[in-house]
Image (cartoon, coloured by chain):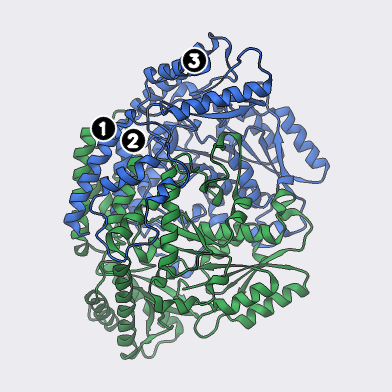
Chain colours: A blue, B green
């Protein structure tokens, strides 16, 4: 492909994407292919000769689109919002077109410095103080693993330089609520702590971590001769967007010198709305936090923002300095390769930059308020329509509901609600996530696609009622 | 930005990228900005109002381009090739435009199944047997960390489900050559083994791991009551593209039941050329291997291919199964979220697919042969021109040289060669990496940008001679 062919194919692909986004609402949200169906239509061997990329829209329509579940669809209510705005798409395009490696400052200074500025813009947008420094990572899972490794090293006086976790020091222990995301357990295990040293702290009626239980668990560990190391608090749990009480947890962390990491993957974006900031009051006292502009905000996946109060600590744990990576500017610049697990880095800040420039902070804030309003509206409708019930508080944009059909025991109720969710997903009209909260099978409605208006939420509510009533 | 504005801005950006690539050779390879210079021109606060993304080419030219080091430049000889082909750029564009999350099969079946097929195409291209299964990761650093964690868990009988590394089992030990990439040490430390349990095995005159020394280190560890766990062998070291003897190392691994991970980050691509495959003879006996199509091949960063022989092992170590991630198809499909550290996944297979379709395997093979030929040519020129010398064998596309100017001691020689490299980098005419090999300060010439022809290598050779002679 030469530059002229690239121009032609690129224009065609841009047009195809524009058309795709314009017609998104007419497509079934969840893909309807069966396992293996996409694979079947692809050749088993790679082509010896080229020339097969002359009709990219055709390839995508024919082979890919049947297997796409549409995350930017206005009736996407599953998992979490994953907005990839138009401006963000162009940021990714520019990133690929430049094709640079931002591992060190020198290997493309703009990649480092635009990222520094964007992380500072974002810091201001969510109302964090100047003491925080940010770096882009791929996902909250990776960032949380990094935070727990940092915590491990601080608590062990940097045992990585010696025996690692394989010395005879008392075992380090991690604390997180029973509602913490699965990535917290995964990170604890991958970092080598072992499940035996992860305490799952019970939650209160709002699904927030109980600080008395946290204190009790720490006391028990101290008595047992263990070494409390880190607390992972969640601002906005996956299931119900519950908020652990950061300030009270920070008291405990300070008292026992524990690392406090805050997982605000989805809900961090909410802090662009000043009214929401009371939900994570105390955040300034955490050691690290992660949130994902690639979720509710609008910078396409992957763009996870990791903030910490002491980047030198990060560099001490993650840094390497082989001769082939040394540059003249080391010491006076940030070499972001030393701030996380991977060495190589894309120029991801471009998509955040283009997006913020295009939309502006006021409009982002207005859209978030719209989504929060839509969630409250849905919760009110559900609460006012027995035997439907809202099973958890709705601080943000996630509504957990279930249909308590009469004369069904818990097991039958679970099957009934799971069947409602699956029927809706199979219909193509909307896509949502069944889950289990407090032992109950529930239907989880996560609102926040860029294109989701009140009318889409109202249509979902009607559909839920009709499916439950068996009329569709 | 609405769909029509996206069309207009998208076309303009495509045209700008095409023009950028067409004029690449006229730009200085290494950015000339000073630390802080790019940052200075960006506003300190994010804009409240939008509308600032109406001239993306203008923004890029004015604010970004001065801070770009051009990795796709024909005179880029630094680090490693990092080719981002035109077709790959369009693959990234399609990925962003679709904006899907491929964490589970159901969340976009095409993302999983196209990846399965591409990983199988790639397996065939580099001549690996059918027993290998591949998954896309971001970087070799992350993949190697994953491999070492898998090794750790297999050797410890999955201690992550219990005390992790914090039990009283004998310490697990990792072995790698003294020429292994810095990411191997980093992964060993992050995985919790501790530097005290990483053995740096001496290398032979070709900078390849000495198997007798490996055997000796393992015997010493067994005597000391330690538990040998994993060997990381390198196919193509960063400094000199040295190849550890995989077959002999595999014998040792089998004998002692060690995990054998092969880091072929840069050189794996070479195996598309069948003549090169003898360099990693024995590869079929490894447990895992990683190589980066985002380096020498042409699929833009980030696209690292991790292959293993037993994906169930990967899933056992990396898998999670919270209720909110369960889907109807679990058990009959691959949920790639369980194959690595991150949960979320982009649709990265698209760029590999578009690239291979566009170019075809024959043309990739021809280009790799061209680069290997250019490296041999340069090595011959250098060897024939004393006091220049080639300091390491040249099995592939990296040539390590130095100018042994008369009457200089080692320290002055080091300064002299570092000065040559810096002078060339500062000139903008070419970009290469100074490094230290065998205690000697050398100049490392890594050949392999898509656009690099013999003429560019010849121009570099002339420049090197002129700079050394002080005539430029």
Q: Dots 1 and 2: beta carbons under 8 Å?
A: yes
**Residue A441 pos. (x, y %):** 61, 25
**Residue A341 pos. (x, y %):** 52, 54
Chain where mark 2 sits? A
Q: Dots 3 and 1: beta carbons under 8 Å?
A: no
Label 1 neighbourhood size at 10 Å, few (<14), some (14-19), many (20+)?
some
Q: Residue at 54%, 20% (x, y): give it.
A: A394
Looking at marks 2 and 3 on the same chain, the residue that comes earlier in the sequence is marked by: 2
Q: Residue at 58%, 47% (x, y): give it.
A: A145
Inter-mark Cα distance, 1 to 2? 8 Å
Inter-mark Cα distance, 3 to 1? 35 Å
Up/down of A445 relative to B314, above or below = above
Residue placed under numbered mark 2 in the picture: A85
**Residue A150 pos. (x, y %):** 60, 49
Is residue A310 at least partly visible in the picture?
A: no
Q: Nearer the viewer, mark 2 or mark 3?
A: 3
Q: Residue at 68%, 69% (x, y): give it.
A: B257
Which residue is the extreme one toward the right? Answer: A223
Chain where mark 3 sits? A
Residue placed under numbered mark 1 in the picture: B1
Q: Nearer the viewer, residue B35 or B443?
A: B443
In this rendering, would B213 be left or right of A280? right
């Amino acid at each position: 492909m030469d530059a002229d062919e690239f121009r032609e194919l690129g224009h065609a692909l841009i047009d195809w994407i524009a058309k795709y986004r314009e017609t998104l609402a007419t497509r079934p949200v969840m893909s309807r292919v069966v396992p293996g169906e996409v694979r079947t239509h692809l050749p088993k061997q790679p082509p010896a000769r080229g020339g097969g990329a002359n009709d990219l829209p055709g390839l995508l329509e024919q082979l890919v689109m049947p297997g796409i579940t549409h995350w930017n669809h206005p009736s996407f209510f599953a998992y979490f919002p994953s907005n990839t705005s138009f401006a963000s798409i162009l940021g990714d395009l520019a990133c690929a077109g430049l094709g640079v490696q931002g591992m060190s400052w020198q290997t493309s200074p703009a990649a480092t410095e635009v990222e520094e500025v964007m992380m500072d813009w974002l810091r201001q947008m969510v109302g964090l103080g100047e003491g925080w420094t940010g770096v882009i990572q791929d996902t909250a899972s990776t960032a949380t693993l990094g935070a727990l490794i940092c915590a491990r090293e601080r608590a062990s006086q940097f045992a990585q330089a010696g025996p690692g976790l394989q010395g005879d020091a008392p075992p380090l222990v991690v604390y997180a609520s029973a509602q913490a995301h699965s990535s917290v357990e995964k990170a604890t295990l991958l970092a080598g702590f072992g499940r035996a040293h992860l305490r799952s702290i019970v939650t209160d009626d709002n699904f927030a971590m109980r600080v008395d239980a946290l204190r009790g668990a720490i006391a028990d560990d101290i008595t047992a001769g263990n070494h409390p190391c880190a607390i992972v608090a969640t601002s906005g749990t996956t299931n119900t967007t519950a908020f652990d009480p950061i300030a009270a947890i920070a008291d405990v962390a300070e008292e026992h010198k524990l690392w406090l990491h805050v997982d605000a993957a989805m809900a961090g974006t909410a802090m662009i709305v000043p009214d929401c900031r009371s939900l994570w009051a105390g955040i300034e006292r955490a050691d690290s936090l992660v949130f994902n502009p690639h979720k509710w905000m609008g910078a396409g996946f992957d763009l996870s923002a990791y903030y910490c109060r002491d980047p030198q600590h990060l560099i001490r744990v993650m840094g390497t300095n082989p001769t082939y990576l040394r540059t003249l500017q080391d010491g006076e610049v940030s070499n972001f390769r030393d701030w996380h697990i991977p060495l190589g880095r894309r120029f991801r800040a471009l998509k955040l930059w283009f997006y913020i420039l295009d939309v502006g902070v006021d409009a982002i804030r207005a859209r978030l308020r719209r989504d929060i309003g839509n969630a409250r509206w849905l919760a009110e409708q559900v609460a006012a329509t027995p035997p439907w019930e809202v099973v958890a508080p709705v601080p943000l944009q996630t509504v957990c509901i279930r249909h308590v059909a009469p004369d069904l025991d818990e097991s039958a109720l679970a099957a009934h609600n799971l069947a409602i969710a699956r029927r809706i997903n199979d219909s193509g009209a909307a896509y949502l996530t069944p889950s289990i909260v407090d032992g109950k099978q529930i239907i989880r409605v996560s609102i926040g696609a860029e294109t989701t208006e009140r009318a889409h939420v109202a249509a979902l509510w009607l559909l839920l009622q009709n499916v439950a009533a068996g009329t569709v």
